[in-house]
Amino acid sequence: MFAARSSALTQDRFFYADQPEETALLVGIELKSAPGEFSISDSLDELEQLAATAGIRVVGRTYQRIAEPNPATLIGSGKLKEIVELRAELGANVILFDEELSPRQQREIERAVNDENVKVLDRTALILDIFAKHARTREGALQVELAQYEYRLPRLTRAWTHLARQAGGGAARGGVAGVGLRGPGETQLEVDRREIGRRIAHLKRELEEVRAHRLRHRQKRRSAALAAISIVGYTNAGKSTLLNQLTALAGPEHTPAGVLAADMLFATLDPTTRRVRLPGGREVLVSDTVGFIQKLPTTLVAAFRATLEEILEADLLLHVVDITHPNALQQARTVGEVLRELGAVDKPVVTALNKIDLLPDPSAVAERLAGEFPDAVPISAATGQGLNDLLARVEAVLNRNLLPLAALIPYSEGELVSLWHTHGLIRREKHTPEGVLLEGMLPRPLYGRFEPYRRR
């Protein structure tokens, strides 16, 4: 299940196709003082979806309501004993926790299970596994590998064999080395930790190069005065389907998005940017971004910094909400929390209330939820219903940031007329003996190019 690039690090933690079927017992906790946006039942349902995406079949679930997490085992000692017995009764070979386990908690739980054939995993490890499966580009692979190493470094134990033993491991790619580097009196664990530290430093340097490359691309886009729109939303809300449809509406001269759209969590990881034409003729750049989820691991947010900076640089956020989901509002609030963590709270937002084609009475649900969101438009990304209205709303919101201008453009500067048509809003166009008289709105970055021809 894990890609070969990570096999050396995952040999005693993760799942492989040639092994017996992975079956899991899910374990959750509910804090009495802070129950959270999602109920414990809904959170475990989502964990089961994640497990299914990773190819694990869930055979049971249990949870405990506690005042505070146990620093040693997360749950109480009595509950842990009950879980060990339930796992044996169900025959599960994975115990999957809905919370991130600290290295100490994971070790203590593994000690209580006392069975090397049973894996103890948490939500973070599961999401990392899914991300490793779905990363397609070099950037995505680097980001996932960095998150994997940073997650596993504090979890190394003496039980691990040296990290270069398996073929296809990190050493073959300049990563974790083998026993040959061990110094006098140095344990293999110390060697592994040092080599993982080196690999993390190397990955961070590579990702800084990716970040610089992205920055150059953004600067180039800015110089062209194309407004940037980032599609955000909870995982599986329909973001990729929406980008595919918007690109199709842009016409045959535009590159199809071709983004995988599947009914699974985190079907797409790597960002895709395409040109889209708004109803008034103005062109914008629309980028798909990785889906959010509750309890999003901090290691992933840090590793995907270069990708998530696309959100920070956007002129507008297009928030896709699956209004057929029973937890639509909770999911939307989770997206808002992640955006606040990223510092993207001051961006204008248009909300696409998606999947109305699956509702028996779309208007009633859309009207009820429309009040919860700014500039909300009910749509179906799958059928195309409402997409023209959505683009019109996006255009109206973007136009709020345009500057008014009237200019007389000489016929010798015809490319400026085309530039205004592409990037601005034209309310009046008149051909005169001196040139083309244009009145309308322009993005601030282009304003200076038209200043010499401005009508006083």
Image: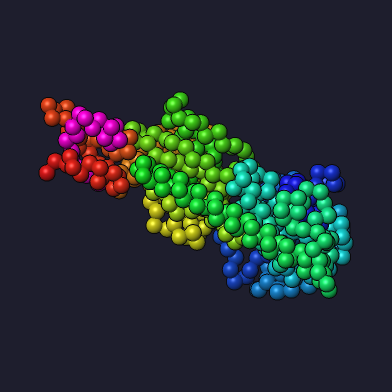
Task: Inspect the magenta stretch and tell me whether residue 261 lies in it.
Answer: no
* One can see residue 401 in this view: yes
* Residues rendered magenta in the picture: 402-420
> Depth check: 122 or 298 in front?
298
Position of 391 relative to 61 (above/below): above
Q: Is residue 351 above or below residue 296?
A: above
Q: Nearer the viewer, residue 433 or 34?
A: 433
- Decide if residue 41 is on the left or right side of residue 437: right
- Residue at 71 percent across and 53 percent down: it is 174
Residue 101 rendering spot, x and y as whole percentages: 70, 65
Q: Percent from the top left, x then y, of residue 34?
A: 58, 68
Report which quarter residue 25 is drawn in. bottom right
Asked if residue 247 is positioned above or below residue 58 in the image, the reply reads above
Name the residue at 46% across, 50% down: 215
For the C terminus, which image quadrant? top left
Residue 373 appears in the figure: no
Q: Residue 384, position in %: x, y?
A: 48, 32
